[in-house]
Image (tube, rainbow, N blue to C red):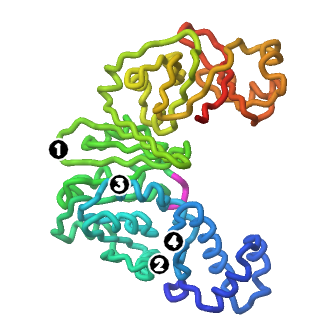
Amino acid sequence: MPIDMMFPDDKHKQFMAAHRDDELNSLLLHASRYPDIDVPFAVQQMEGRRKAALKFPSLLHFDDAVFPPQINMEQASSETTARYKASLIAGCEVIDLTGGLGIDSLFMSQEARHVVYLERNEALFALAQHNFQIMGIPIETLCNDGLAFLQNTQRQVDYLYVDPSRRDHNHQRVVSLEKYEPNVRSALPLFFQHASHVLIKASPMLDISLTLRALQHVAKVHVVAVRNECKELLFDCVDEPCNTEIVAVHFGMQDEERFAFSSLDEQKATVNYSNTAKKYLYEPNVALLKAGAFRILSERFDVEKLHPASHLYTSDQLVSNFPGRIFKVIATFPLNKEAINQWIPTRKVNVTVRNFPFSVAEIRRKFRLDDGGDDYLFATTFADDSKRMILCKKKVS
């Protein structure tokens, strides 16, 4: 789409307002009814605003904000994760080498001393620049390829931020670090010529241990989760030997949980195991599970682990600051029809499987259990290798 067609005029704004709540695919199918309207463009903007309401609602404060195709919206950071990254570079000078829609640059500009936004796609660059201008954001913008820019400048900054594309030329998702564009692993020597820190955003699907070995310069790994869904991994790289710290951060509905440790902490941690579920059961948040904080939780919070591979914890004394969900244990019993009849007569329960031979779907189907209700059933393996059910209620106060 030509750049001069990217910004809706009054006619398109009126159309979008009139069809704000319409089904968008239907609008596309009946585009011929609106010969004076670029319906695909209008639908792109309407869909963008709907996505933004969930992902970065601050942009909706500006009626003239514009949005790119959905493939660009998907890779853009959410407002929550962008604010977190901004907190990591507070007071620094930063170059965002792969600016995209500009969400990270936007929020970094609120914390950093100075932000330079680079984007090689002319249409996306024009869109982001327009949004920065209507918001009054003081960001230096350059339409250029990030690597080419670094190869032709002597500029020095505190941080380079890189959010590489995770799709190939056929727009298919890629997971391997070497298939990212740009290839951050091979570009690290160039990056360190211009910055003391390189912050790399990566897919939550990456294996952290393998990535640490591949990059070899990681001072910190940030595992960022929102509402129990892991959203991104951040690798803070420095050009000097270092011991890697892992920070697991989880943003819930109203609270934030952070837990920091090192691989050595995890390896050396003392773990106590239990053959029984005690008064309270603890389920770590997803950021901790992705980060590999398994043994260290037992030591730091004085809770017993049910099994090396179960990743559930228990105690008689309440540990109210445990980073995850806390449950009150009602009963423990084997998985059979008689026990289910006794303890779950309503057949309505939330089922979770941890280190167990049956899936949630198999358990539901076999015992005709419906999802929902106030009870939670954990199917798991204990330290003595026995496989049992733990029936709980979620602790809410």
**SS at mark 2?**
helix
The residue under the point 47% across, 78% down is 127
The residue under the point 55% across, 42% down is 228
Q: Name the residue under label 2.
A: 127
**Camera-side mark, 3 or 2:** 2
The residue under the point 26% across, 69% down is 114
| Residue 122 visible in the snapshot | no
**SS at mark 1?**
loop
* Residue 25 horizontal/vertical position (percent): 75, 70
Q: How crowded is mark 2: few (under 14 residues within 10 Å), some or many (20 or more)?
A: many
Q: Could you tell me the amino acid type at mark 1? A: Glu
* Residue 239 horizontal/vertical position (percent): 19, 48
**Camera-side mark, 1 or 3:** 1
Q: Return the mark for residue 183.
A: 3
Gap in angstroms between the C-alphas marked 1 and 3: 20 Å
Q: Earlier in the sequence, mark 4 or mark 2?
A: 4
Q: Could you tell me the amino acid type at mark 2? A: Leu
Q: Which of marks 4 and 1 is nearer the N terminus?
A: 4
Gap in angstroms between the C-alphas marked 4 and 1: 39 Å
Q: Could you tell me the amino acid type at mark 3? A: Asn
Q: Mark 4 points at which residue?
A: 59
Q: Earlier in the sequence, mark 1 or mark 3?
A: 3
Q: Mark 1 points at which residue?
A: 240
- In the image, which residues are magenta? 168-173
**Residue 392 sits above or below residue 26 on the image:** above
Q: Earlier in the sequence, mark 3 or mark 2?
A: 2
In the image, taking residue 141 as reference, residue 166 lies left or right, namely right
